[in-house]
Image (cartoon, rainbow, N blue to C red):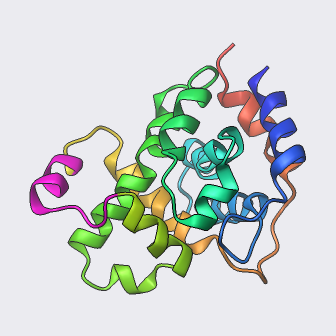
Amino acid sequence: MIVDEIFALFAALGSGLYGEDVSLERHMLQSAAMARALDAGDVLVAAALLHDVGHFLHPEGAEAALAGRDIAHEALGAAWLSRGFGPEVTAPVALHVAAKRYLCAVEPDYYATLSDASKLSLAAQGGAMDDGEAAAFEKRPGYAAAVLLRRCDDRGKDIGTETAPLEGYRALLTALARA
């Protein structure tokens, strides 16, 4: 079952760094906790928890992130997750990088709030969207959920924030997973 595979990936690779001051596991857990604190709903909590799973799946995952190379982790992760979850979970995962590019285009102060690692990856991911790209993004299904996920992602990088353990999400993921 995909939930067991997810837990195995976290166990094997979750402690890895990816350019931030926290491990991937802590970042993903903090992002999920932020979604939960915002009452974003179970689907978005799951998407926030799983949004960076693509870093686990790519052979250069953490190394590419540290070097500022784009590995399209969002597309890789969403495709892999689609084996067990529907688009309500995978679409925000697939769009969370585009949401960063979008927010840089539509909110003048947003770029300054990004971590150094996010600024580095933004350059490799295409930079801020232009007006046409931003307008098109707003028409995509799941765009609002992706923007909310992005905000959780941005706030999930605090070395001092403690979260519930991954195991606390097993029932949620199991309930949302397709048979």
Could you tell me if residue 162 is visible in this image?
yes
Residue at 47% across / 72% down in the picture? 120
Q: How far from the left and from the top, in percent, is residue 138?
A: 21, 50
Asked if 146 appears above or below 117 in the picture, the reply is above
Asked if residue 164 lies left or right of residue 137, the reply is right
Left or right: residue 69 compared with residue 61: left
Q: Residue at x 66, y 48 (%)?
A: 60
- Is there any visible trace of residue 32 in the rendered image? no
In the rendered image, residue 165 lying in the magenta stretch gets the answer no
Looking at the rendered image, the quarter that the C terminus falls into is top right
Residue 141 placement: quadrant: top left
Q: Quadrant of residue 19?
A: bottom right
The span shown in magenta is 126-137
127 in the magenta segment: yes
* Residue at the image position 21 percent from the left and 71 percent from the top: 106
- On screen, residue 108 above or below 166: below
Return the residue found at the far left.
132
Say left or right for 20 vs 5: left
In the picture, measured across the screen, residue 124 lies left or right of residue 68, that is left
Count of picture labels: 0
Tell me where residue 14 appears, x and y as whole percent.
81, 53
Tell me the quadrant of the picture where the N terminus can be found. top right
Residue at x-position 45% and y-position 75%:
119
Q: Nearer the viewer, residue 18 or 3?
A: 18
| Percent of width and height locating residue 115 | 53, 80
